[in-house]
Amino acid sequence: MKPHFIAACLSLAGCLFASSSHAQNPDPADIRACTGIESDAQRLACYDQATGRVNLPAAQKRTEQQAAAPGVFGHDRNGTSTISAQPDSGVTQPLSLLDSRWELSPESKLGTFNVRGYKPVYVMPVFATSNQNNEPHSPNPVNTVTSPQLLDNVESKFQLSLKTKVWQGVFGDAGDIWVAYTQDSHWQVYNSQASRPFRETNYEPEAMLVFDTHYEVLGWDGRLLGIGVDHQSNGQSDPLSRSWNRVMADIGFERAGWTVMLRPWWRIPESRADDNNPDISNYMGRGDMQIIHEWNGQEFGLMLRHSLRGGSESHGAAQFTWSFPLIGNLRGYMEAFKGYGESMIDYNHNATYLGIGISLLDWY
């Protein structure tokens, strides 16, 4: 049985007990216990029990709920997180993308060890390029392929990306620690000649300390500041092994319908003899910018990445993504990539990729 389900049951039981003795004068601590319940129905029942509203007529309950105090957290009919706009207004507005995905404001906190989406979760049966990397190479001779590989230009790609909060309120009411894991795989599923191998799988665990911020820059709200460590590797043996470790910052801005995430990073140095890819920062960059736009149920993403160097060390990449509703929670997904570093094995390989498939979760 999952820990958060046990906690939810205990919280609900505590609220039911509290309501029998404090229905007229509810204890704020009992009400706060309700916030840890993940199920919408159980959480609402907990609030009703704690405030003595269990026997109110349905119409009266609805009127009181519409006049909820500011900061009451809930969901609309589409499952979007909402927070009441102002006292007695009866109007709710959706939480911003960053707030709903990172639980920044006090009203959006859901506690620890709730598994959330991070980067898009998708399956693309078709992921094609006109310039497949048949001979991966690196300045380290140990990590250079000497015989061309038999690879198809059309393969499939899928990605799993999840995160969870492991510590809420590191510095009193400020700062949450999140851990995340992202895995994406390139599968030569149509390459029967080579027994349909997995060409490349990238593993990326990371941990980050995230703060809620409140400032304005040129009309954009600065809502998130984070610092963390990131490891990315492909888990292969030489000559195909690739890996690096980074210290990363996350700086999040938003305005109506738009989110921008800036991520500068510093690569943790490795010894020259053990470094699979000593020049990776000049290709996969020293920072990127992710721009997300939500419109009519669709989500558009643009990633821009660069080495932040000039001359022969100037390299970068751009990626455009588009997700759109299909049926229920199932969404269509399209991805276009141009530049260096579409995957770890291709960190210094320049190519254009195009893929299409389905998505279950979008950005952050």
Image (tube, grey):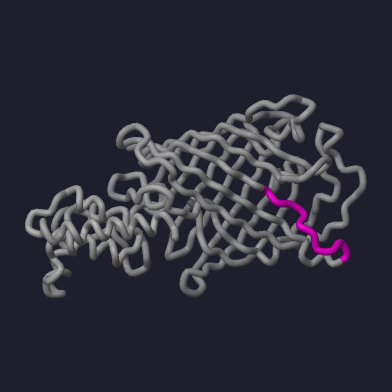
The quadrant of the rendering that contains the N terminus is bottom left
* 322 drawn magenta: no
Q: Residue at x 16, y 74 (%)?
A: 58
Viewer-proximal residue among 266 and 171:
171
Q: Residue at x 44, y 39 (%)?
A: 177
Q: Is residue 92 above or below residue 172?
A: below
In the image, residue 243 lies at what x, y percent? 70, 38
Which span is picked out in magenta? 193-202
Q: Quadrant of residue 305?
A: top right
On the rendered structure, is 134 left or right of 49?
Answer: right
In the image, residue 265 lies at what x, y percent? 57, 33
Q: Residue at x 59, y 50 (%)?
A: 182
Q: Is any part of residue 137 visible from this angle?
A: yes
In the image, residue 171 lies at what x, y percent? 34, 32
On the rendered structure, is 335 left or right of 219?
Answer: right
* 201 drawn magenta: yes
In the image, residue 312 lies at what x, y percent? 75, 30
Count of residue discs: 0
Viewer-proximal residue among 203 and 68:
203
Q: Quadrant of residue 150?
A: bottom right
Q: Residue furthest right?
A: 147
Q: Is any part of residue 218 visible from this angle?
A: no
On the rendered structure, is 147 left or right of 59?
Answer: right
